[in-house]
Image: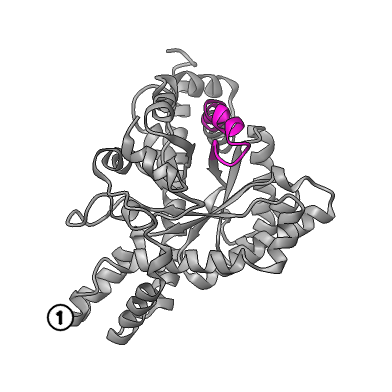
Amino acid sequence: MSETLKRLSAEGVSVWLDDISRERLRTGNLEQLVRERNVVGVTSNPTIFAKALSKGSAYDEQVRDLAVRGVDVEEAVRAITTYDIRWGCDVLRPVYDRTEGLDGRVSIEVDPRLARETEKTVAEARALWWMVDRPNLLIKIPATVEGLPAITAALAEGISVNVTLIFSLERYGQVIDAFLAGLEQARANGLDLSKIASVASFFVSRVDTEIDKRLDKIGSEEAAKLRSKAGVANARLAYALYEEKFGSDRWQALKDAGARPQRPLWASTGVKDPNLPDTLYVDELIAPGTVNTMPEATLEATADHAEVRGNTVQGAYDEARAHMQALKDVGVDYDDVVRVLEDEGVEKFEASWSELLGTIRRELEDKAADGGGA
């Protein structure tokens, strides 16, 4: 096992893989990453599934059976994706048991087309929770305005939730409040709070991509000096907010009832700018009680040469605030940045979902035309 990844884990960072595929599961690669790369969780999204379905033949047999049965494309998508997630949950189950439910988690996202519809999101979360039927599952719900009450409702029913597409500090605060409200309702419903898990996926690299684009447009020397630092600064301030919210009397009452905190999860941690260090969003976001979900390239880079130099978050709050103020001073509108990123995030996942539906529809039609034959 990589000594670098062992040190990262020792600092309180849970290493999760931001990828899943039938091929990775079938070949035992995921088990290998758990064993050799200290991977203790897995996340997925529509883009990851669309990519997995477009490669190789790992899904052919299941698609053939679905075509023979004449299922529609929506049912086929859910049958295929939940199969992978269930398998992933089983691979990670020993980690879940060993960590007493802290890690060993696998995430699946609700249909992104429902991101602006509360009741349908809750219904979808229930359906996925039932279909996968594993205690180490997390249901991903987007942190849209409409998603917030869905997060509360799901948690209140004992459904563990990965809140995704968080970009702004204000929205993150609302996400934590939705989490606390959900656990309070779960407690009132008589549920065992220790069995309910949640992470809050705070996106990092996309913030730099959008802000750097605006800094380049401003074009001043002052603006140029501020490039590629906002993602880390924003995430560090999110951790400060996490500490504040989970230091409250409201949280203490839930903790006393057996609840676990909603951990901050650093998402979008693969650098988008090739000029940046490829482990930037690992090196600069080391703090206890966090999750870093990495694409495989970032995971391997981290194993090879990440700089694990202790906690790089808690002593940097003033620096982070100063950076965000400097961005404002040169004319970067933070509120507009995070609004654009949330809208784009939903649109990108919707586009990937449509791509996934299209791929499976074509596969079903091809197999049906062949009479279900090989």
Quadrant the C terminus occupies? top left
Image position, residue 52 (x, y; %): 39, 33
Quick one: which residue is furthest to the left in this view? 221
Residue shown at 73% from the left, 49% from the top: 258
Image position, residue 286 (x, y; %): 39, 54
Quick one: which residue is furthest to the top in this view? 373
Q: What stretch is highlighted in magenta?
A: 84-106
Q: Can see residue 358? A: no
Q: Can see residue 307? A: yes
Seen in the picture, residue 318 relative to 130 is either above or below; the reply is below
Image position, residue 180 (x, y; %): 69, 61
332 in magenta: no
| Disc 1 target residue | 221
Main secondary structure type of the part rendered in magenta: helix
Q: Is mark 1 on a helix, strand or loop?
A: helix
Residue shown at 42% from the left, 28% from the top: 30
